[in-house]
Amino acid sequence: MIMQALSVSAHLPKETGILNCVGRFNHALNFVTPSGELLTLHRYGRGLSPMGWMVSDTDFQAIFNDENEFVEYKNDRLVSPNWQLIAPKEHLSLKLVPQKLPDGTFTALWDILRQSKAKSGLHGSLSEATTGPLCRELKELKANYQRYLQGERIDWQSIIGRGPGLTPSFDDILIGMLLVTFLNPEIDSDSLPNFFQDTPSLGSLTTLVSVNYLRFASQGIFSTPLQTLATALVQPMKLSQAVRLLLQVGHFSGADTLIGVWLAGMDEMG
């Protein structure tokens, strides 16, 4: 069976060879290259990651049902004994482009979050997390983020990997903060040190999936659900819908990411 992927990321692993399936989920299949890079097949409707291929619902189910643990990756295609998946010629860049944010953008986001009962991984509901005084952990995180924006190198190891899920809560919070860092043109992200420069190897601190999302986020590369949120921050009338869509990502990932965006944007709220 020969299948055509609907879209693929422009940031896929360059390495070819035999991939090992290391995670099977209803909406994602995770494969690892011989050197440990991640490649993910996404069921249509669940967004595209920087390491992803988006596959139609029917084709994804066929691949899922095949249960073959190993596939060959070469020449922009995945090859299994029972199927081949071919990438389209055009690859989608997920590099975020800085855009001017209207006054009041983060206040508009806060108005949505402080009414939301969606649960985060470690900090209760979004309403609880974003109203009242910041808890000690988030206060320290915000202070370290401000130091980073001043050019300091920060060791993030005390929080990376903390929280439930394939992408632990604080990892998602950091990704939300990085989204603001690369979106806001008032932040000169090119002049800042590498976000994880003074942090031990991410692979020793968190999950393989989270390592990849963090690594790409530190380069300004984000999944399509986060690209949608970025667009909504530039056009706040779209924020409510973008927040709803992001809250459908993972058990807590969407909510935790939104906490990070809110934290990074707090100083813009006046």
Image (spheres, rainbow, N blue to C red):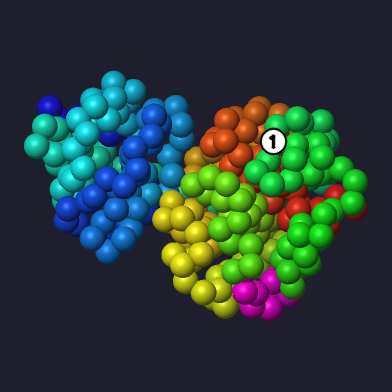
Question: In the picture shown, does residue 144 fall above or below 170?
Answer: below
Which SS type dominates the magenta stretch?
loop
Tell me where residue 95 appears, x and y as whole percent.
Answer: 49, 53
Name the residue: 43% across, 51% down: 209
Residue 238: image quadrant is top right
Q: Which residue is mark 1?
A: 119
Tell me where residue 102 appears, x and y as whole percent.
Answer: 77, 45
Q: Residue furthest left?
A: 81
Q: Nearer the viewer, residue 9 or 177?
A: 177
Q: Is residue 86 left or right of residue 246?
A: left
Name the residue: 69% across, 35% down: 119
Q: Is residue 141 left or right of residue 59?
A: right
Q: Is residue 107 left or right of residue 186?
A: right
Q: Nearer the viewer, residue 130 or 182?
A: 130
Question: In the picture shown, does residue 85 fall above or below 195?
Answer: above
Tell me where residue 155 appears, x and y as whole percent.
Answer: 62, 74
Q: Which amino acid is tagged 1?
A: Lys
Q: Residue furthest top?
A: 58
Name the residue: 75% across, 30% down: 117
* Mark 1 Cα shell of 10 Å, populated few (<14), some (14-19), many (≥20): many
Residue range of the region highlighted in magenta in the rendering: 148-156
Name the residue: 21% across, 42% down: 69
